Image (cartoon, helix red, strand yellow):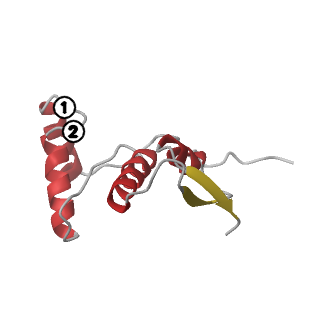
Amino acid sequence: MTFKPKKWIGVGDFIISKYEKKYLQKVIDSNRLSYGPMSRAFESKFSQMHQTKYGIFCNSGTSALQIALAALKEVHGWQDDDEVIVPALTFIATSNIVLYNKLKPVFVDI
């Protein structure tokens, strides 16, 4: 029995267009990889597209959850140790963000 080699699937490979390269070069030329002029422009355009007052660029889903939950806590007047319902089966960041905001996760099977 012989095995044929499988097609190689690389990890971390990507395809990028000339259009995307142009904007990546602008980021590199700005000497700012985080929160530079392109980030601010993205936030502004994103908030306009979604007709919201603010748009916040995040480096990860975890950071986005942190910002969102902190904002909800502030806007709704939640107190430390208030309960937040989270799915029992989820990525750990979901419950960690609740704890980080000094709230209490309540796990439910959804």
Residue at horizontal 56 percent and vertical 57 percent from the top: 83
Q: According to the image, label 2 marks what residue?
A: 35
Amino acid type, label 2: Tyr
Report if the CB atoms under discs 1 and 2 are less than 8 Å apart. yes
Residue at horizontal 36 percent and vertical 43 percent from the top: 59
| Residue furthest out toward the top | 31
Q: Residues within 10 Å of mark 2 (few under 14, many from 20)?
A: some
Residue at horizontal 19 percent and vertical 53 percent from the top: 42
Please determine whether, in this image, residue 24 is positioned above or below residue 84. above
Find residue 96 and report its image quarter: top right
**Element class at badge 2:** loop
Where is residue 12 shown, x and y percent of the image?
47, 40
Q: Taking 54 as reference, is 71 left or right?
A: right
**Residue 34 visible in the displayed image:** yes
Q: According to the image, label 1 marks what residue?
A: 32
Where is residue 103 shown, x and y percent of the image?
52, 49
Q: Quadrant of the C terminus?
A: bottom right
